[in-house]
Image (tube, rainbow, N blue to C red):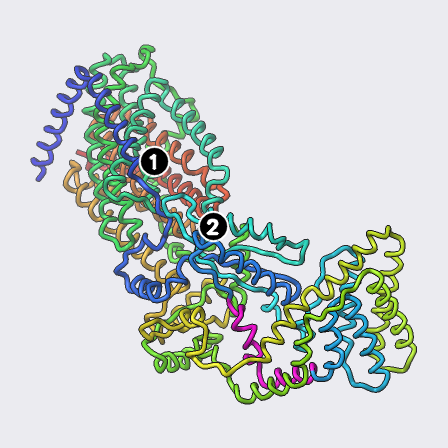
Amino acid sequence: MLQYRADFRAGLHSRLGCWADWITRAAWWIVIVAVLLTGFSLYYTVHNLGIHTDTGKMLSPDLSFQQALRDYRQAFPQYTDTLVVVVESSTPDRAGDAAATLAQRLTQEPDLFTTVYLPYGGKYLDEHGLLYLSSDELQKISDNLAAIQPFLGKLTRDQSLHGLFAMLVSALEAVQDGEPLELSPLLDKINEAVRANLAGHYYQLSWQELIHGKTAGEETHKRLVILQPQLEYSQLQPAKTAIHTVRELVRDLRLDPAHGVRVRITGKVALAHEELQTASRGALMTGLITLALVGTVLLVGLGSWQLFLASVLTMTAGLIMTAGFAAFAVGELNLISIAFAVLYIGLGIDYSIHLSLRYLELIRDSTPHAEALREALTGVGGSLFICTLTTATGFYAFVPTSFAGVSELGLIAGTGMIISLLLNLSLLPALLFLLPPVRKGNVQPRHSRIMGKVLGLPRTHARTVLWAALTVGVVAVLLLPGVHFDFNPLHLRDPQSESVITFRELLESSTTSPWRITVLTDDAVQANSLATQLEQLDVVDRVHSIEQFIPADQAEKLLILKDLALIVGAEFELQQITAMTGFNDNLKAVKDLLETLDRFVTTDQDRDLSDAAARLRRGLKQFLYDMAATEAYQQDIQLSELEESLLGALPRQLHRLDASLNARAVKLETLPNELLTRWVTDDGRYRLEVLPARPLDNDANLREFVTRVQSVSPNATESAVVNVAASQVVVDAFIQALTSAMLVITLLLLLLLPDKSDVLLVLSPLLLAAGLTGAMAVLLHLPFNYANVIALPLIMGVGVDSGIHMVHRFRSALPSNRDLLGTSTGRAVALSSLTTLCSFGSLAFSMHPGAASMGKMLTIGITATMLCMLVVLPALIYRHIQSGTAS
């Protein structure tokens, strides 16, 4: 084996020498061929490489949870890739009207929206909504309406300020005559409208709350419109047109705070859309600053503009060719595989730095130009070959994983390393031959006395350095159990973005939580049985099914509605006979009501009602006083605005009440098709919707919710399940990939390095750097996530390459003074690490939380790797020499 490795090294050295001689003769041809290949790759990439932002395609379709999700989406495609428009108002009336208006307009855009769905709204619920109340609640509404029936008729016929105040006058007089009418809520609501009008604020009286005889719950002030947009995945922002259309319609319909409505957009599609916007915000400026910083560091580190230009051109050509291979091999990049560019730049420039600095070292040592190029290739080419073999094979170890995003990344990045090697052994030396740096005599870099001592620490205090490294390593191992993977995708998005804020608010309520779980069942019997089991779980608030749309106690409720129709039904036949009132009629009505209130508060009436009347009297007096101080046309506007505040929501509520009086018995077969198809498939399968009992903005709650539900129904699916299951797949994929990569790299090093102890020299600092990275992540409360986990293969690649270069230099060309860090290899390792830090460490300041976490993890990992390779590895080498075991 030893003889084989010696023959291999000798053969490789000889072939590299011949290759260098040929390059000096064919430099121009090499450059021309490289330019043609780069141009072709660029053309092919532009016309064939796409970007697919559908994260679901990054996971293997054969995974059980992926199959369950696919079955669900095939059964109910209307729930796939949705936008959730959240419409809020201070009253349920305004929220409902605004949501209905917006939904109606969106249905007129079939080219942009496949489906438009208004949960708990529409014609069907207008007609049957009262049946979903309890019998007691319905009876109370019936009693309230029966009590005010004489007054309701007046308001129905005259839906104006005049009609409302005339009704109030009659009602107050009836109370004085002993009628038991509960008018306090209505008087207070009217007073709120008057006060809002005086303050110039938007207000709309809720007739829904008045008719129901109670204040509606908070959830009724928030209505959802569920949209399924047509997405263009070939575009970087697939939902841009759809979201822009929604916002334009909201603006055109004046659904804004000035008109009492707040509209926000969230949902899976909106979250992805805003994530891309956040990632691209300031990206150009940050990229230019980073490019300038990296360029400066590289130019200063290489010490020659010729070396700088040759290195950058080589790296650029390799990146374009790798992109061309990606276009050929996979066709479309996903949000993981697109990171191949990060890996290539970080590792590709490393190859160029090592070769360029070795060449420069020889030039400064007065070695002739062609000979320096030959010695640089033969001296560094061997380590570059081993680096490529180990790193590329390590990346290829990612391919068999079930995480398609990582698998494709491994294929592209591994091939990119081979492309980088070929270019750095051909194009780079050809460019260096054609653009030789200006010779400045025998001028080697000199360090200050202090810097010399610092660089000499690993040699002069090797034992101390190694004991310190061992101590730090033990502490790191103790901290590693604290490393965890954050699977919550919300944590990777801008917490200040509209979609994230709205999504989190929806998660706080089980009624609106987007992370509910869906279960498909074979039939109604299984659905009812499974729903009963799920409702026994303490993590489940309730289970929805099509059964919830079959009202209970229908016979009793229909009798109540029949009686109510006999009492008030005739009034709705006169709705069109609305009196035409003008300014004078309305003003007189205000004054008449004020006079009635003056008389009413002086009588000995019910204290609550008397207090409410007094409050309204003060408000109306202030209203008339302020109105008298304005111009005539402004007075008309003020009265019209008050009328709109008080009666704007009345027509729709009267319409709904009228429609509900004609409700009929509800059966499964009488449900509207739009509703039925959202719960039952054509082949008879039933959908269950499991709502959480606890807020799911807490990761522990989310994981427990999913785990407990799956214990009852293993085929449960939807976003909550996918988030938890996918996180385990990603963690397993990276553990598998990195473990396989390390095993393969270890075997290759055993085969290719001249001494088995060299394998320990390369891997020991790398393992220490990995431990330090994990420990620092724990101390800084920086969990791994879908974004920053990509940093691991780059850290591994940089560490392995740096270790190979350092050990190769130690074995092949260690200076007589044994100053390993003073060689071009030591400087190349430091410069390569610095350029990587400058390139990707700047991501730590990104506005995108995911990119920022990746930048932080890379900064920690590359810094740890650089320290281990420049301090611990030299100390190991010097102890190796001192122990007398070095060959």
Give how far across and how far down residue 187 sits, in percent. Answer: 79, 72
**Residue shown at the point (37%, 33%) measured from the top left:** 457
Q: In this view, does 300 lie to the left or right of 565?
A: left
**Residue shown at the point (42%, 50%) measured from the top left:** 777
Our reading of the magenta stretch's main secondary structure is helix
Q: In this view, does 18 lie to the left or right of 828?
A: left
Q: Residues within 10 Å of mark 2 (few under 14, many from 20)?
A: many
**Magenta highlight range:** 119-145
Q: Is 271 contained in the magenta span?
A: no
**Residue shown at the point (68%, 53%) measured from the top left:** 258
The answer to which of 783 and 608 lies nearer the viewer is 608
Q: Please identify the quarter of the rendering in which residue 82 is found.
A: bottom left
**Disc 2 secondary structure class:** helix
Residue type for callout 2: Ala
Q: Is residue 872 visible?
A: no
For mark 1, what is the residue?
Answer: 346
Residue type for callout 1: Gly
Q: Is 137 contained in the magenta span?
A: yes
Q: Which mark is residue 242?
A: 2
